[in-house]
Image: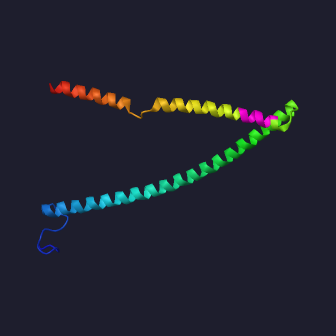
Amino acid sequence: MSSPTGGGPPRGTAEKQLGEIVGEVSAKASLLVREEIELAKAELVDKAGKLGRGAAAAAAAAVFGLFALIFFLHSLALFINWAGGLPPWVGYLIVTVLLIVLGAIAGVLALRFFRRGTPPKPELAIEEARRTRAVLEEARH
């Protein structure tokens, strides 16, 4: 019985040549890799869009938060004027001094955090690497 492929064994049988099988596997693997890359690209574009929208919403929230803080501080200065029966500039001066003190505290804390974090060296990872090296050298001897 003759096969429709021109004399060779019919396609789909176990009698395919090794070269054909390797070629098919190689072609299918290549196709699979290309499709995986396309899927990864599409996924990254989708996630980048979502991150962009999230960043825009966060920026809007920060702007509104800053405006709210400004109005709160203005209201605090006016409250100090009203509660103390003081001239308006005194309330604003008190709020300004309060902001300077809070800024100085935040600056000192930031300086402490920076000093603790420098130099940026992964000390735990380095220690683990030393231990691993010691174990490997011990096993070698």
Residue 17 placement (x, y as % from top left):
12, 63
Q: Residue at coordinates 47% horizontally, 29% vertically from top-left?
A: 116
On screen, residue 39 versus residue 71, left or right, reads left
The N terminus appears in which quarter of the rendering?
bottom left
Residue reaching furthest right? 85
Residue 93 is one of the magenta-drawn residues: yes
Q: Residue at coordinates 28% horizontally, 26% vertically from top-left?
A: 131
Q: From where the camera sits, is residue 134 visible?
A: yes
Vertical placement of residue 19 versus 3, above or below:
above
Q: What's the colour scheme?
A: rainbow
On screen, residue 118 versus residue 101, left or right, reads left
Question: In this view of the protein, which residue sits in the foreground, 37 or 138?
Answer: 138
Q: Which residues are magenta?
A: 90-97
The C terminus appears in which quarter of the rendering?
top left
Q: Residue at coordinates 62% horizontally, 30% vertically from top-left?
A: 105
Question: In this view of the protein, which residue sits in the foreground, 16 or 133?
Answer: 133
Q: From where the camera sits, is residue 15 visible?
A: no
Question: In this view of the protein, which residue sits in the foreground, 5 or 101?
Answer: 101
Vertical placement of residue 50 versus 116, above or below:
below
Residue 123 placement (x, y as % from top left):
37, 30
Residue 6 is one of the magenta-drawn residues: no
- Considering the whole magenta stretch, tell me its main secondary structure: helix
Residue 133 placement (x, y as % from top left):
24, 29
On screen, residue 107 versus residue 135, left or right, reads right
Q: Residue at coordinates 23% horizontally, 26% vertically from top-left?
A: 135
